[in-house]
Amino acid sequence: MTSSERRNTQTGTFKPAIPKDSQDVLRLYAIAARVVCDKPEQLAEINQRLQTIRSQLVPPESYTADECTKLWSVFVAVAQYEKPSLNIEAGKALYRDLDMLGQRLELAPMDPWDYIPAGIDDGELSEVSTVGGSDTLQKVRKLAKAKIKKQSRRKTLRMQEILEFLMRLDPKELNKLFEELVGQGKVRRGDITIVERYLLKGGKLDKEQSALMQAILKLGDALLQ
């Protein structure tokens, strides 16, 4: 959806897609504030949508969203009283804070407040696959090792097996695995981002996606440790 199309979105609509980068994350929270300023009764629903989106992000976008959420909570504290004039002032204050955050992250300046649309409808949120099973990392590692033990001729997991195990993990457990491996220097942050985005989009493996395949294999090795 182009910028002009977004500006024409009906006021009060808040159906965003998953942000593609940190710039999109900042803009998402600014749009959310504009919508609440016009439709304060939608605050609870918008809050829930933001939480849903936040749970699906990976670094560096998730880090940006964490900072935005802190700023957003201050706006919510005011917006819950549904006083139009206060909402607008709080919205503008949030916008300025978001813009300052963007500067610290060396992102491009945000559009002026008056150009931030009071609605967004990308029509994609409900179609985005979520990474989310309910298994613990300990359980998945045990299952992965058991599968290899049964296949005496193999010492590594197949690509599809790795993906299936990753999809079994509870989102927090998946993030725990990622942070553990990055912290140990066994997997690069870029590898994690590639795999996570692939899982979120629910895409199919392409023979030309060598970077993705290499990243998945590294995670497979990690599950067998």
Image (tube, rainbow, N blue to C red):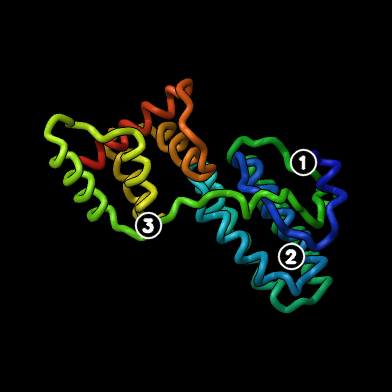
Q: Residue at x 86, y 41 (%)?
A: 4
State the separation of the CA atoms marked 2 and 3: 36 Å
Name the N-terminal-most of marks 3 and 1: 1
Q: Mark 1 points at which residue?
A: 1
Q: Is the residue marked by circle 1 packed among few (<14), some (14-19), or many (20+) residues within 10 Å?
A: few
State the separation of the CA atoms marked 3 and 1: 32 Å
State the separation of the CA atoms marked 2 and 1: 28 Å
Q: Is the residue marked by circle 2 packed among few (<14), some (14-19), or many (20+) residues within 10 Å?
A: many
Could you tell me residue 35's position as x and y percent? 77, 62
Query: In this figure, what is the number of numbered marks?
Result: 3
Say what secondary structure mark 1 lies in: loop
Q: Which residue is drawn at 59% across and 54% down?
A: 68
Above/below status of 217 relative to 84: above
Name the N-terminal-most of marks 2 and 3: 2
Q: Mark 2 points at which residue?
A: 90
Circle 2: residue type: Ala
Say what secondary structure mark 3 lies in: loop
Above/below status of 195 relative to 96: above
Q: Nearer the viewer, residue 193 or 106?
A: 193
Q: Name the residue under label 3.
A: 170
Q: Residue 165 carries which label?
A: none
Residue 101 seen in the figure: no
Residue 190's quadrant in the figure?
A: top left
* Left or right: 67, with 190 as reference point: right
Could you tell me residue 209's position as x and y percent? 47, 24
Circle 3: residue type: Asp
Above/below status of 154 relative to 67: above
* Left or right: 57, with 188 as reference point: right
Residue 98 seen in the figure: yes
